[in-house]
Structures are given as C-alpha cells and as structure tokens.
Amino acid sequence: MGKTLPRGLIVSCQALENEPLHSPFIMGRMAVAAQQGGAAGIRANGAEDVAEIRSLVPLPVIGIIKREYPGMAPYITPTDAEIEALVRVGAEVIALDATIDQDETFLSTLHERWPGQAFMADISTAEEGLRADKLDFDYIGTTLIGYTTQSKGLDKFEVLRRLIAECRHPVIAEGNFNTPEQAAEAIRLGAHAVVVGSAITRPQLITRSFGDAVNAALNG
C-alpha cells in the first residue's frame, strides 16, 4: 500500500461541472488553503484535479471520478477505466462505490488487479461496510449514508459506531459531518479520520445557509 492516510481532518475539494469553482486550478488552490488550515489529507474528484492537487500539496489524496453509465447505479469510480486514470496520476487512495449496487467480484479482486494500490470503500449501511471490511478494503468510509435507497433514515453516528466496533480496517467518517462538533465527535468515537466537504469548500452552499438565516430574520 502507498502513502497511508494520517488521522485527522480530510478536506474534500470538489466542484462539479455545473458549479462555479469547477477547475483543477481552483481546486488546487483550495487544497493549499485546506493544508494551511491544518488538513491531514484531501479528497478530490477527477484525474486532472488530483494531479493538480498533488503537484501543490504534500498531503495524501483520496481520488475519485464521478461518472454515470446507462443502467449502472454506482457512479463513484464505477469501473476499471476510472481506477486506471487515478492510478496514472498517483492518487494515494482510490475511493469507489462499495454498496450492494456494485458487483462483488469487481470489489473482491481490486488488489489483484491493482497490487500496491490503497482502496477506500464508500458505503451506505453497516452491512455494506462489514462486507467491504471482509473484502480487505484498506479504508471503510460512511460516504453514502442517506444517498441510497437502503440507507434512507439511517443515523450516521449509529452506523459509524458499529463499523468502528466490528471492522478490522480503519473507518473514515464521511457524509454530512457538517460542523466542527460533529467532526470532533466522529474522532472521539474512534474514526480514523473525518472527511468534510461542502461545509468548507462549497461557498455557494455556505452562502446559502447564511443567506437563509439572514432572510428569515429580515422577514420574521
């Protein structure tokens, strides 16, 4: 396995094509800002973004590629083509959909096909996380809780607690840990690291939360 993920805060620096900050240049500078703020690692979407970030900061990068295929539910690094692109740019860890929607043979043979590469399982339920643990994923992430049919209504902290108690591999808290207090609680529970994205790196969403509060006060 390559460079491992240290314990601490991982900042997700992502902007989709329809978002104002979509640009490898901007995401690279966002990663520099995250490093200056004390981040221990970065999560990034797209081979170009990963390459740019790795050229600017020494932090380990969790790389993903979001891509939709007709008739295929998984969209986070769903095929070997996306893995190959991330391997080429040196992503220390590659995260991918490891929910029940993804083929188990595809998941179970990752280390055979990509020896030496570290992989993180993005899961949505405790059962999916335990399966990924048995399949020898290097990291288990709670990334997709609430985003799949089978995880609607689940409490992220309850899933996190069970995975920390039962998994052999490090568990990473990710998915709507939107406040410093929630991030700190995840670490106190025993999470190896916590990934925070929108609350740090999506200014349009941050602005909206302030704007909604201010407008409510104006109209209240």
Image: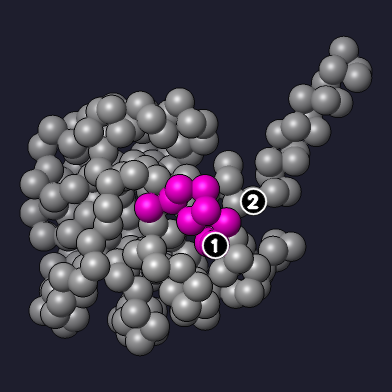
Q: Is residue 148 visible?
A: no
The x and y percentages for residue 41 are 39, 57
Residue at 28% of width from left, 28% of height from top? 188
Residue at 75% of width from left, 32% of height from top? 210
Question: Is 204 in front, or is 193?
Answer: 193
Residue behind mark 1: 32
Q: Is residue 216 visible?
A: yes
Apparent side of residue 27 relative to residue 60 in the rendered image (left or right): right
The numbered dot on residue 117 is none
Tag 2–tag 1 contact (CB < 8 Å): no
Q: Is residue 35 magenta?
A: yes
Apparent side of residue 76 relative to residue 208 in the rendered image (left or right): left
Apparent side of residue 166 relative to residue 33 in the rendered image (left or right): left
Packing grade of label 2 (10 A; few <14, some 14-19, many >=20) is some
Question: Is 192 in front, or is 56?
Answer: 56
Q: Label 1 amino acid?
A: Val
Q: Secondary structure at mark 1?
A: helix
Vertical arrangement, residue 173 with respect to residue 49, above or below: above
Q: Is residue 49 magenta?
A: no
Classify the position of the N terminus by image quarter. bottom left
**Alpha carbon of mark 2 to alpha carbon of mark 1: how far?**
15 Å
Residue behind mark 2: 202
Answer with mark 2 or mark 1, whichever residue precedes in sequence: 1
The x and y percentages for residue 72 are 41, 69
Chief secondary structure of the magenta portion: helix
The residue range painted magenta reads: 31-40
The x and y percentages for residue 66 are 48, 68
Give the farthest residue toward the right. 219
